[in-house]
Amino acid sequence: MPPQIDPASITVAPLTREHAEDMVTWRYEPPYDVYDIAGADPEQLLHPGAGFFAVMAAGRLIGFRSFGRDGQVPGGDYDDSALDTGGGLRPELTGQGLGRPVIAAGLAFGRARFAPPAFRVTVASFNVRALRTVERLGFARTGSFAAARDGREFVVLVRPETA
């Protein structure tokens, strides 16, 4: 059983090589394996244009957040009206109520760093936990589409940022 994580200790930090090498080993149980980045080249995650950041708690990597193109799913119709964001938790930490504080920390980081007019997330339609979490954080559904890769349905949600 993983140690208990204090939501107040969650921060977003630059991604290191060690983080990237760890993340590409993470495997999720089906159907959540659609989120696997297993086998990806850690160099791709470290490239500044990839927009990946580490989510830390008490000095330990517990997840990641990404901003920009990585938050987009091929097959969706995206524009520049919002900043796309995505992310994931270490597989053994899923289902423990950490999604909301991790996403909230990512949004606060993204707001401070990028100052977007809105945030946009794309979530697999079967992922009821994630959909419920982002809706509780103020995201509203704006559409859905079939992914180009496998035809799986994804839901697009947007949250305007207020000054």
Image: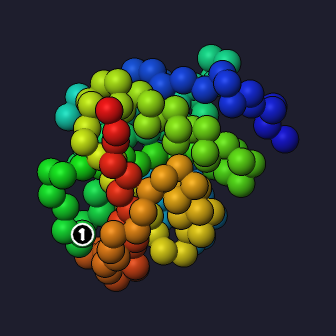
Q: Residues within 10 Å of mark 1 (few under 14, many from 20)?
A: some
Asked if 130 appears above or below 116 in the picture, the reply is: below
Quadrant in which the N terminus appears: top right
**In-image side of 121 versus 126 (left or right):** left
| Residue found 61% across the figure and 38% down from its top | 101
Q: Position of residue 126 (x, y in %)?
A: 54, 75
Q: Looking at the picture, does residue 37 appear above or below residue 22?
A: below
Q: Quadrant of the C terminus?
A: top left
Task: Pick out the residue farthest to the left.
Answer: 80
Q: Is residue 41 visible?
A: no
Foreground residue, 14 or 114? 114
Residue extending furthest front?
Answer: 163
Q: Which coloring applies here?
A: rainbow
Q: Give the tally of numbered discs.
A: 1
**Mark 1 secondary-structure assignment:** loop
Q: Which percent across, then down, holds residue 119?
A: 33, 47
Residue 19 relative to residue 74: left or right: right
Quadrant of the rendered image containing residue 72:
bottom left
Q: Looking at the image, is 45 positioned above or below residue 153?
A: above
- Which image quarter: residue 2? top right
Residue drawn at the location 54% of the way across and 23% of the way down: 11
Query: What residue is disc 1 on?
Result: 76
**Which residue corresponds to the image point at 19% horizontal and 61% vertical from the top-left?**
78
The picture places residue 136, in percent across and down from the top left corner, at: 57, 55
Q: Position of residue 94 (x, y in %)?
A: 67, 51
| Residue at the extreme right | 1
Residue 107 seen anywhere in this rendered image of the structure: yes
Q: Is residue 21 left or right of residue 117?
A: right
Q: Amino acid at mark 1?
A: Gly
Quarter where residue 27 is shown = bottom right
